[in-house]
Image: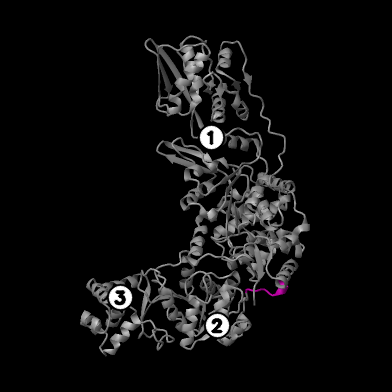
């Protein structure tokens, strides 16, 4: 008797599970052993009904063993291998060739899409065996090149394939969607805000985190959402990384190579953002991997949550540890945070008056000066433009996202070449120890910076943050060396550079 | 232990108003040690309440004054009694002057002291003006006296520290307590910069609303001049101004817009005859007898000729038309937003412009 291979998910990693079935005489019963969770245990009802729809009536005492016995199994993904194992034990199908079978069964024998297909494809590729998935998952597994994958519509299809009566549909080459979706909102639709636009261009080019400060209605959220439209499209490798996270959570596959944009509300729990739960799922921060994580009303977030995000933002990955084990998820995100200048939102506004009490202001100041601000390179105040100010900039003509995106892409290309072989691809990821050596500063930058550092009381960390931003500004201008004006501009975006 | 110090520590922690208790005791004509020796009978006879007497008895019982003195020594806090040679001369003879000062930092400080006070909820213009005043006082080798709060207090200290001056923060809580939170670094800089934190309250005293107006009499008395930058009619700064006038200190006020609630108090002072602070350098030359320009060798403000042509253009726009956003500056100065940022950063570092609201910039007054 040989088993059928299925998988179970452990974090984002698929682990092989061998399904063994024995049928003995006696009254009908199915028992499943090997640490199944509720979804696996319930699979016996789906499996029995699906087999019956094909005319196979299961009789006797059926024992299903899921090996290795000490690995907890989760999800309905084991329905198909269990059904195959039972059918094999009943002698209705021939021996099963090596391969990994995935699928949730409907009562009429159809196969439903499942979570974790991409992870399973990576496992199948690494072990050099074919992979059989429900049709609905065929497109995403085609992302993993070198994995021979086949899609089946129903249990009947799989049976027919095993009996040699029918071929299954093989996964084709992955084709990224060619249709360029127009950015929404487009920068061409945003009036004024030249400062914030410029900052977002730098953020997109160097993957720097951004904090917007501005009164209600100044357009912080709109600007943040426009950022997605100027980020360079993902490379196939990056896209695979994002698809892996999405598939782990069972989010429908989308062929667009757009970097993800995730907005998190401040009532969200730590687990939903950082990941975790009894099944160690990835959180929002991992869903935003290679894309943008947007925290609106930043000071409303719980302190411990922001503290929890600090290390992951630095490392680009987050380790979730629970009693049931620990897993690591990627989270290389561009953080965009937005906050009001004060609790009522009107501090510094030319028309409206701030009505906050002093203790409120003190509390607020304490709240927004938390340690996560250390991870933010660009501090951008967003003025609420008055009607007459809008009129004054009316005829300047706003640049469309597509034009900005080209400059961003060129700057990224320069960075990719410069940092090739170092393990990171953009200026913001540059580790502290490399900042001074490898930024290629022009000769007069050093004296300028030291005189500025003294006047503005910049810390060591502050200086290197300014230099990283200056490097990105120089990349946007396609200049090899960082010049004094680049550093001066970078100084305008530091913490307190534009805050009153 | 010095009997006077023990007595004063005891009174400071009694929960009563120390100057009153002391003056009642002085009327008896007894030596300081008698206060402790005679005990509760004396205290009640001179008019201490039941509660105050009980507190003092309990404190004496567990040797609190000795332990407090020890604790202060460990924390590097000096205890300055009213007959100490280092007790500020400006406080002697002032009714209600504190009997005992807890001091962290350098003491005594020499120089003419100017108190700079105002609302915690100041505008960025007020903040900037207070910074400039603090800076000018520091340049003139004067001392800035203020509270330790956010807003004008903070601006005055920071301005003074930036020009290497000494500042005194008079606190409404124990000098070992940082209030408001977030001012740890400011207080550290005040102490390490050769200034001091001063309080009449024992160590560990938490901030309470009624202590701040009480503390204001020390600010008013410590400094020869008082500058009110921005203050609403009902505010601690106005209390300080009234107290300063009562003991004959010179009171200055910075004029503000008449429509602003925040300026109603300071403008009212001007109406009532306070000196108008219309130029920082005039204030310093009048109050300190110094011409600022003569004493500034390494002036942090570069002369206009040191600015690039673009920087001059930005500065000219801001001076002419007031508060501007980056958008307006880019249009009116005919340059790219990137250049605007670059210029603003250098101008801000040179102390010529400052952010006056989210995304809005103004030229520095003065």
Q: Secondary structure at mark 3?
A: loop
Residue A4 appears in view: no
Per the model, the C-alpha gap separating discs 3 and 1 is 64 Å
Q: Quadrant of residue B218?
A: bottom left
Q: Which numbered marker is on residue B269?
A: 2
| Rendered image: mark on residue B14 | 3
- Residue B58 rendering spot, x and y as whole percentages: 24, 72
Q: Relative to A37, is A215 above or below?
A: below
Which residue is labeled 1 in the image?
A249
Q: Is residue B251 above or below residue A393?
A: below
Q: Are marks 3 and 1 in contact (CB under 8 Å)?
A: no
Residue toward you, A122 or B330: B330
Which quadrant is the N terminus of chain B positioned in? bottom left
Residue A195 location, x and y as percent?
Answer: 68, 58
Residue B282 seen from this side: yes
Q: Which residue is rendered at x = 65% and y = 64% of the image?
A: B360
User: As drawn, which residue projects farthest toward the right?
Assistant: A395
Q: Which quarter of the rendering shows the C terminus of chain B?
A: bottom right
| Left-right relation of A460 to A21 | right
Q: Quadrant of residue B201?
A: bottom left
Part of the protein shown in magenta: B300-306
Report the chain holding disc 3.
B
Chain for disc number 2: B
Is residue A315 magenta-colored?
A: no
* Tag nearer the camera, 2 or 1: 2
**Mark 3 / mark 2, whichever is N-terminal:** 3
């Amino acid at each position: 008797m040989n088993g059928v291979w299925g998988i179970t998910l452990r974090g984002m990693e698929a682990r092989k599970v061998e399904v063994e079935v024995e049928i003995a005489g006696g009254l009908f019963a199915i028992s499943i052993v090997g640490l199944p969770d509720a979804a696996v245990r319930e699979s016996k009802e789906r499996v029995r009904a699906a087999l019956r729809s094909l005319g196979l009536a299961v009789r006797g005492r059926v024992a299903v063993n899921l090996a290795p016995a000490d690995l907890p199994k989760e999800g309905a993904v084991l329905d198909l291998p269990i059904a195959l194992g039972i059918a094999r034990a009943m002698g209705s199908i021939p021996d099963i060739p090596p391969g990994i079978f995935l699928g949730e069964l409907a009562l009429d024998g159809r196969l439903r899409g499942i979570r974790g297909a991409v992870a399973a494809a990576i496992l199948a590729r690494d072990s050099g065996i074919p992979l059989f998935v429900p049709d609905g998952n065929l497109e995403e597994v085609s992302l993993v090149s070198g994995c021979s994958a086949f899609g089946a519509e129903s249990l009947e299809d799989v049976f027919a394939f095993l009996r040699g009566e029918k071929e299954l549909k093989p996964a084709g080459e992955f084709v990224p969607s060619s249709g360029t979706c127009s950015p929404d909102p487009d920068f061409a639709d945003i009036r004024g805000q030249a400062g914030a636009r410029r900052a977002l261009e730098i953020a997109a080019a160097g993957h720097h985190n951004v904090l917007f400060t501005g009164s209600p209605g100044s357009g912080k959220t709109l600007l943040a959402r426009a950022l997605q439209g100027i980020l360079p499209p993902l490379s196939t490798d990056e896209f695979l990384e994002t698809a892996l996270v999405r598939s782990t959570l069972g989010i429908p596959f989308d062929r667009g190579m757009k970097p993800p944009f995730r907005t998190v509300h401040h009532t969200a729990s730590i687990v939903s953002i950082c990941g975790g739960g009894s099944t160690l799922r990835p959180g929002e921060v991992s869903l935003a991997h290679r894309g943008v994580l947007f925290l609106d009303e930043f000071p409303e977030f719980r302190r411990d949550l922001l503290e929890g995000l600090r290390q992951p933002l630095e490392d680009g990955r987050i380790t979730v540890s629970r009693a049931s084990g620990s897993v690591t998820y990627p989270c290389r995100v561009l953080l965009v945070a937005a906050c009001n200048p004060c609790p009522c939102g009107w501090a510094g506004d030319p028309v409206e008056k701030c009505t906050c009490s002093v203790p409120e202001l003190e509390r607020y100041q304490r709240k927004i000066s938390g340690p996560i601000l250390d991870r933010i390179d660009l501090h951008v105040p967003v003025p609420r433009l008055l009607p007459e100010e809008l009129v004054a900039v009316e005829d300047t003509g706003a640049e469309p996202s597509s034009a900005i995106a080209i400059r961003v892409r060129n700057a990224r290309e320069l960075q990719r070449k410069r940092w090739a072989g170092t393990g990171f691809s953009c200026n913001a990821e540059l580790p502290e120890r490399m900042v001074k050596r490898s930024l290629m500063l022009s000769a007069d930058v050093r004296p300028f910076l030291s005189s500025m550092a003294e006047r503005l009381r910049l810390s060591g960390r502050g200086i290197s943050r300014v230099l990283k931003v200056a490097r990105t500004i120089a990349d946007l201008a396609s200049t090899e060396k960082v010049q004094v004006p680049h550093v001066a501009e970078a100084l305008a975006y530091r913490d307190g550079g534009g805050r009153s | 232990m010095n009997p006077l110090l023990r007595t004063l520590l005891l009174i400071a922690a009694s929960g009563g108003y120390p100057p009153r208790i002391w003056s009642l005791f002085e009327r008896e004509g007894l030596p300081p040690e008698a206060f402790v020796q005679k005990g509760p009978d004396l205290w009640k006879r001179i008019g201490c309440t039941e509660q105050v007497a009980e507190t003092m008895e309990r404190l004496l019982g567990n040797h609190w004054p000795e332990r407090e003195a020890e604790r202060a020594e460990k924390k590097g806090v000096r205890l300055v009694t009213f007959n100490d040679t280092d007790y500020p001369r400006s406080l002697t003879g002032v009714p209600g002057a504190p009997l005992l000062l807890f001091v962290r930092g350098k003491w005594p400080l020499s120089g003419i002291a100017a108190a700079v006070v105002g609302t915690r909820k100041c505008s960025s213009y007020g903040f900037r003006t207070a910074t400039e005043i603090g800076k000018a006082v520091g340049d003139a080798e004067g001392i800035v006296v203020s509270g330790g709060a956010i807003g004008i207090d903070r601006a005055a200290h920071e301005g003074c520290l930036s020009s290497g001056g000494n500042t005194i923060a008079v606190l409404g809580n124990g000098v070992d307590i940082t209030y408001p939170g977030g001012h740890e670094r400011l207080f550290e800089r005040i102490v390490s910069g050769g200034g001091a934190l001063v309080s009449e309250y024992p160590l560990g005293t938490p901030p309470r609303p009624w202590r701040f107006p009480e503390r204001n009499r020390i600010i008013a008395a410590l400094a020869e001049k008082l500058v009110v930058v921005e203050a609403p009619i009902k505010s601690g700064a106005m209390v300080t101004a009234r107290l300063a006038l009562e003991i004959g200190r010179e009171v200055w006020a910075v004029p503000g817009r008449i429509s602003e609630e925040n300026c109603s108090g300071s403008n009212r002072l001007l109406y009532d005859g306070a000196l108008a602070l219309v130029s920082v350098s005039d204030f310093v030359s009048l109050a300190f007898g110094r011409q600022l320009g003569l004493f500034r060798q390494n002036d942090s403000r570069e002369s206009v000729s040191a600015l690039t042509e673009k920087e001059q253009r930005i500065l000219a726009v801001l001076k002419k038309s007031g508060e501007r956003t980056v958008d307006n500056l880019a249009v009116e100065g005919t340059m790219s937003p990137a250049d605007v940022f670059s210029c603003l950063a250098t101008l801000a570092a040179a102390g010529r412009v400052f952010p006056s609201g989210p995304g809005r910039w103004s030229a520095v007054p003065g």
